[in-house]
Image (tube, grey):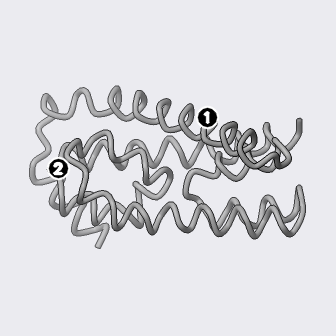
Amino acid sequence: MLFIIGIEIGKDANIEKFKGVWKEGIVLSLGTIVGSFIAGLVLYLALNLDPKLCLSVAIGMGWYSFTGPFLAKNIGYFAGALGFTSNFFREVLTLFLYPKFKDKKAAISIGGATTMDTTLPIISSFSNPQTSLIAFVHGFIISIAVPLLLMLVTSI
């Protein structure tokens, strides 16, 4: 499926048209990271749980296959299970909610790291090739950021 999406994006590969894709992807990624940190802080304040737990689960940004095992090893099994489950639901919610948003570019943020792989087909189906490319860049940046941010948060 990703190969077919790549061909579809490549067919419409006008360099001038996609010049701002990296800029938009970076700005959107920064918004996703800040929003995830804020969500972690809000959960900490609302649920009165360990701040490290809340922040690390939120900063997983949809990458459940990394976040769950990483947190299980570094914080404990409960953190691992919570990190896996909440980030898995983030991916599932993206599959169901993305088509309902009017602003398709801003809605990319709900997918987090999954926007470059598992949720890219749904994003491509309900948007245009430029938005799909922004989603790919966003997912790429978030996928690089998640391990770094998780190491930072869990080491505090």
To which residue does mark 2 refer?
129
124 w.r.t. 45: above or below? below
SS label for mark 1: helix
Q: Which mark is residue 38?
A: 1
Which residue appears at 82% of the width and 49% of the height? 49
Task: Tell me residue 64's x, y (percent).
Answer: 62, 64
At label 1, the amino acid type is Ile
Q: Residue at left 78%, top 65%?
A: 80
Which amino acid type is shown beneath numbered disc 2? Answer: Pro
Circle 2 Cα neighbour tier, 10 Å, few/some/many (<14 / 14–19 / ≥20): many
Crowding around mark 1 (Cα neighbors within 10 Å: few <14, some 14 to 19, many 20+) is some
Left or right: 113 with respect to 106?
right
Screen quadrant of the C terminus = top right
As drawn, the label of residue 53 is none
**Residue 149 locus on image (x, y percent):** 70, 39
The CA distance from mark 1 to mark 2 is: 30 Å
SS label for mark 2? helix
User: Sequence order check: which comes first, mark 1 or mark 2?
Assistant: 1
Do residues under tags 1 and 2 come within 8 Å of each other at their CB atoms? Answer: no
Position of 92 compared to 75: left or right? left
Q: Quadrant of residue 154?
A: top right
The x and y percentages for residue 65 are: 64, 67
Q: Is residue 25 above or below residue 102?
A: above
Determine the residue positioned at 67% across, 62% down.
Answer: 66
Q: Is residue 93 left or right of residue 72?
A: left
